[in-house]
Amino acid sequence: MSLGVAAPAVRHVEVFGIRHHGPGSARSLLAALDDYLPDSVLIEGPADAEPLIGLVSAAGMNPPVALFGYAADRPSLAAFWPYAVFSPEWQAMLWGAERGIPVSFCDLPASMTLAAAEQALDEPDPADDELDLDSGHRAPAAEVSRDPLAQLAAAAGYDDPERWWDDVIESRLDGASPFPALTEAMAELRADDTAYDHRRAMHEGRREAYMRQSIRAAWRSGRQRVAVVCGAWHAPALSPPLPPAAADARLLRGAPKRKVRFSWVPWTHERLTSASGYGAGITSPGWYHHLWTAPDQPVVRWLSMVAASLRTRDLPVSSAHVIEAVRLAENLAALRGRPLAGLSEVTEATRAVLCDGDELAVRFITDELVVGQRLGSVTPEAPTVPLEADLEAQCRTLRLKRTAEAKYVDLDLRKPNDQLRSRLFHRLRLLGLGWARPGQSEVQGRGTFRESWHLEWRPELAVDLVEAALWGTTVVAAAAAKVAAISRDGELGELTVAVERCLLADLPEALTGLLQALEAKAAVDADVLHLMEALPALVRAQRYGDVRDTDVGALADVCRALLLRICAGLPQAAVGLDDEAAATLRRRLDGVHAAVQLAAAADDPVAAEGRTRWLETLARLIERPDLNGVLVGRMVRILADAALLDDAPVRLHRALSHGVGAAAKAAWVDGFFSDGALLLIHDSALLELLDGWLQGLGPEEFVDVLPLVRRTFGSFGSAERRAIAGRIAAGAGRPEQPVDELDPALGEGVLATVARILGVRVGD
């Protein structure tokens, strides 16, 4: 007799333990979901990022991409959760979106994990530098446990866990579900695991407690068939029967939290590799992508791609090579008892047949295809900071693409679009965004109207973008705000660097305040070295300002004032210096002289007057007996190049006289002859003096001065050194030796050794 009471609903949960980035896992997971038909899918991932799951199927979402979570008031405190197209979690999200089945993240919220990470940063622990191998994200006080894959592979007789996983999971094309066996195997490993310390066990325990609470919440909401997609290590802890909920609630109670924001950001295959430092990384994302997108005849298709890639390097690879490589890969797999040729087999076939043993070509294939340079894209619907939106809009206007592949761009500043690109790049540099960095021009005859840039977008720049967004909502506003902060708090060196970059970035209003701060800072800075370090950047900025039609009148006034103070303070700053301090001052000396020359080249009478004052200061200093030899030598060289000294050989002869120590002589030579190859080639008198000094050194003196002399002449080019040697061999600078001074007996041993090397008999 029925009492009219409905029978309680049967609640069920199925746990699918996967590898975070594996095409075999993804393929098996989709088959298992189709068979199980859940009414709710829970995925290991930050629970508070659930609103972003709905964007996975939006137009413009092309993996690899990553969830990006960061603390609202501390953007540098951030974490990424990356996904490739072959990641099981990504495919599970798409599976639910296509069928209208709710999908949720079930792991600890980022508000908890980032708060815990912040505590770990504030209270450092030696174990904090390790990575959570399962999630791939930095975990507080994480101690790496032994690799479960390595243990399973060893039990199966494999010495390579990657090959074992490839055989049993990734290369599978049948529909058999591997998940029950994996869960059972992980349960055995967990029962014997002793590698976690207490703090790591607490972190992992909280994660699994939250996942179980998420399962219970799905049941309470009326779901009856729940599918859980998680790392295989967690599968035994989430499989029914579940422990009492009260114990999990106690474990989670009191966990620290903080406000977190999320976005989707592009990612790269390179950043999915374990070599990049990613804890859940794989060795061959490009190969895994191929296994996912080309499941039919993967070996043939792969080696065809390899051949096409090698042809772009002008290597002769024919269809016959591809056929032979396929045969070799399949035969190797058969000999090794593998169900399908894996990456190791196709790599060996590539090396032997397609690359003819050329390891450089094999490394190219590894970088180009095995790892790959693929960069994902994100839908415009994804939430982002206003600065990112402004940067994207400017890139579209200027026809710039942010790609993971490094490339060089040459700009002609006479062209409006190139000038706008240059301003954008310089503004990004002010903000610390390293997408564009100055590079080496491939264009000959480069002048002040040309700039070269090295462009390479890296996923971690998303963090830098969020940090830079604290300065403003647009690139120009953020750069100006950053300059204002430097004007307020920066030291003299920072101010001078900022002046040059601010001018190149075309921020006139910010430049005005920066120049005022620079003038005030320079007026109270009594350190001549600081002033000398500041001047070159300011002179360069003044020169480039002329190219960009920018008013640099105020900058010219600052430069003149700095040079006056340098000339006044240099005599006192240059005396009584040891070798290290003298070397530092010499570098500053060269920088100031180059700046003075650059300013005087503009035919400015005031700049010419400054050059004259500078050279007069040096002319007075070279007569001081208390100057370090390297400084005297350098100043004499500068004045000789300026045609203000006609007794340079006399001064060199005096510096190399017997009354001067060997080290002091070498220092003087280093200062005078650095970058002076042409001087030695064309001035026979100087070459004769120098050669005579070197020949007159005793054994001990020669050993003492050799490092300094070698450093001096090692900077010469090989052609310049050959020319100098030729002049000496021809007799310039070498005193003649009488033949009767030669001792044939001393040369017999040398001749015998040379004859043995050449394979001839002495006397032939």
Image (tube, helix red, strand yellow):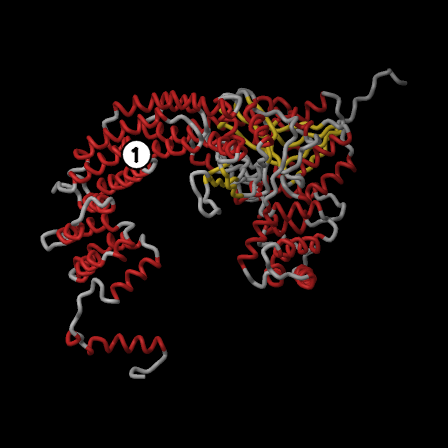
Measured as percent of width and height from the top left, residue 123 is found at 42, 28
Residue 723 falls in image quadrant:
bottom left
Left or right of 597: which side holds 112? Answer: right
Q: Position of residue 631 (x, y in %)?
A: 20, 43
Above or below residue 48? Residue 602 is below
For residue 440, which quarter of the picture?
top left
Figure check: 236 above or below 731? above
Picture coordinates of residue 362 (x, y %)? 57, 56
* In this rendering, position of residue 560 left or right of residue 273: left
Residue type at mark 1: give it.
Glu
Examine the rendering and report whether any part of residue 143 can be seen. no
Q: In this view, does 16 lie to the left or right of 447?
A: right
Give the position of the C terminus as an image quadrant. Answer: bottom left
The image shows residue 387 at horizontal and vertical percentages of 54, 25
Number of marks drawn: 1
Question: Which residue lies under the disc numbered 1?
Answer: 533
Q: Nearer the viewer, residue 423 or 226?
A: 423
Residue furthest right in the image: 1
Residue plotted at (28% across, 60% down):
724
Q: Which of 620 and 610 is in front in this view?
A: 610
